[in-house]
Amino acid sequence: MPGRKDDEISARVERLLTAQPTAPPESRRVRRTFAIESRSIESSRHLAMQIRVDAEFAQAYRRPGQYVTLKVEGWPARFFVVAGRPEEQVWEFLVDRRGELGPMVERLSVGDELSVSLPEGVGFDPGEAAGKVAMLFCTGSGVATMRPLLQCWLDGDEAPQTVALYYGEQRPDDFAYEALLKRWESKGIDVYRAVEDGGNKTVPYRYVQHAFDDQHPPLGDGFVYLSGAPVMIQMVARKLMAMGVAPSRVKINI
């Protein structure tokens, strides 16, 4: 019965979208102060910021997709995903320059201090998709969630058989990690870009789901990883579940 199946998919997608951290960002947490080690402009939209944490914090970061809260004096704490391999002591964060905290972060300099909480969330298990198909969908700074997962696969021995990354931005010059995108492609990862600006002629797709419709690997028993705009997560999750992907194989970084 198509109607019943649609209702079941809608309920499963709603559960994905309403999953939340155990506490809001401003809640009491174990936090320590670390200094900014370096910062760089990644694109017209993104800024990358690196901090060096101590050994205890580094060991607490165990899975790609985990997140922390960052707090600067006088500003509210906010969640940020750690955009680097687990257990490394240099943590990178990708900041949306047009977002709420973008202007504040742009005013920070090397040596300025931030309050950082311990990593949270179950993150992603890099080994679960070993030998299978992995499809990654992200928009905006959600690409930072996918970066450590891809690094684990490229550096380890539990990589999927096929990896496709669908990455969407508002404008062509918004894409972060340009050098990494090229490196990932050189390592066999299929990278598909989408640009929301309808006037763009250099990228053939407007939304990541359009790129998927045109180019996607056989689904089989593949895994799906999602990070970015809720509307994108909703549409992609609904589409892939309707195509037969099991809900347990659709992952977000909560």
Image (cartoon, grey):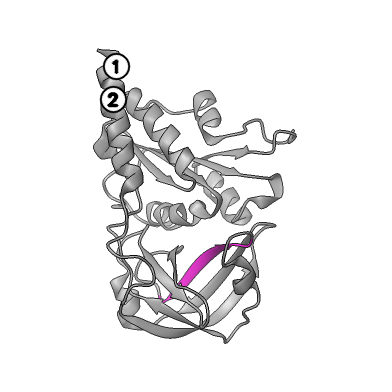
Count neighbours of disc 1 (C-alpha within 10 A) and say few if under 14, some if 14 to 19, many if 20 or more.
few
Label 1 amino acid? Gly
Q: Which residue is mark 1?
A: 3
> Residue 131's quadrant in the figure?
top left
For the question of whether residue 213 can be seen, the reply is yes
Q: Circle 1 — which element? A: helix
| Number of other residues with Cα within 10 Å of mark 2, as a class: few under 14, some 14 to 19, many 20 or more | few
Pinpoint residue 79: horizontal percent, then vertical percent: 43, 65
In the image, is residue 96 part of the stretch drawn in magenta? yes
- Residue 114's mark? none
Q: Residue furthest top?
A: 1
Q: How many numbered marks does the figure carry?
A: 2
Q: Is residue 236 above or below residue 83?
A: above
From which residue to which does the magenta span run? 89-97
**In this rendering, would 94 be left or right of 123?**
right
What residue would you read off at disc 2? 7
Residue 157 included in the magenta stretch of the image:
no
Q: Secondary structure at mark 2?
A: helix
Q: Residue at x 35, y 42 (%)?
A: 160
Front-most of 220 and 110? 110
Residue 26, image x, y percentages: 38, 72
In the rendered image, residue 59, in percent from the top left (x then y), is placed at 30, 74
Question: Quadrant of the image for the C terminus?
Answer: bottom left
Residues 149 and 9: in front is: 9
Asked whether, in this view, residue 83 is left or right of residue 100, the answer is left
CA distance separating discs 2 and 1? 6 Å
**Which residue appears at 29% of the width and 16% of the height?**
3
Q: Is residue 178 above or below residue 222?
A: below
> What kind of residue is marked 2?
Asp
Quarter in which the N terminus is drawn: top left
Cβ atoms at labels 2 and 1 below 8 Å apart: yes
Q: Quadrant of residue 57?
A: bottom left
